[in-house]
Image (cartoon, helix red, strand yellow):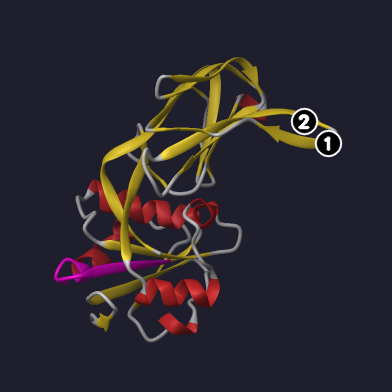
Amino acid sequence: MAWTVSTKRSAITPLVIQCGDSLVPITLASLPVTAVPTTPRRSDFDEVFATLDSAAHPRLIVVGDDKALAAALTRLMRTERLHIELAFVPNPGSAAAKAYDLASGSSAAKIALFGAAESVPLIRDDTGRAIVGEVHACGAESGAITGEAYVDNNRLFTGIIPGLEIVPTPEHPGLRARVLRPRRFGRRRRGKWVPGRAAQIGAEAVVLTRDGVVDPAPSTRGSIYRHNEDWLLVR
């Protein structure tokens, strides 16, 4: 069953996916809610998309963690449904909420239902997975990285570093990256953010953690870059 909700700009058809044991705020409790695993699988979106595909102004509301939002955005990208608005009610500690300056709790639920969608850059990796919060890179067994990395044509590092991080931005060019420096006085130091459209890493061994999902094995390279289409984020 699809519901229609009037916002300041238009009437939308919202549908909520509840990921794992994430709590659905009272504001959203009366809407159609589909319970899915903590990290939704491809098949978990079939029924959801069947409902939203018939709506004039569809909106998918994800209640969960960054992995859940990334899974939803990945499916929208791969199935050419980036016209569907995507709202997020994050679990505590969400890097995506920080990256896009999103609210949490009941405030996030109200925005998810009544807020307006904005076009923002879609950041992905070379395997076709969307990035919504943070990519952390380190060497094998959480050790140092030996290699080099670039953001567009700007060299981020060459040599040996403890690690680096890449995050999406709500404005163009779409992402920013920085080097993690050796600890000093017990604190992790971080380099200056370098913005760009793409970040590329080449190393003897690198392990990427994308939105909390760790690579099963080290690789020698990795690419994070802006997709050729934006996505519609409600905020």
Q: Residue at x 28, y 48 (%)?
A: 230
| Residue 187 appears in the rendering | yes
The circle drawn on residue 186 is: 1
Please identify the quarter of the rendering in which residue 94 is found.
bottom right
Most foreground residue, 211 or 133: 133
Residue 205: x percent and y percent? 55, 20
Left or right: 186 with respect to 171? right
User: Circle 1 — which element?
Assistant: loop
Most foreground residue, 78 or 103: 103
Residue 202: x percent and y percent? 48, 18
Does the magenta-highlighted stretch encompass residue 151?
A: no
Mark 1: amino acid: Gly
Does the magenta-highlighted stretch encompass residue 61?
A: yes
Query: Dividing the image into 4 quarters, which one contains the C terminus?
Result: bottom left
Please identify the quarter of the rendering in which residue 104 is found.
bottom right
Pointer 2: what residue?
A: 183
User: Magenta part of the protein: which range?
Assistant: 51-62
Mark 2: amino acid: Arg
Mark 2 and mark 1: Cα distance apart in space: 6 Å
Q: Residue at x 41, y 49 (%)?
A: 170
Q: Is residue 28 above or below residue 140?
A: below
Tell whether label 1 touches label 2 (CB within 8 Å).
yes
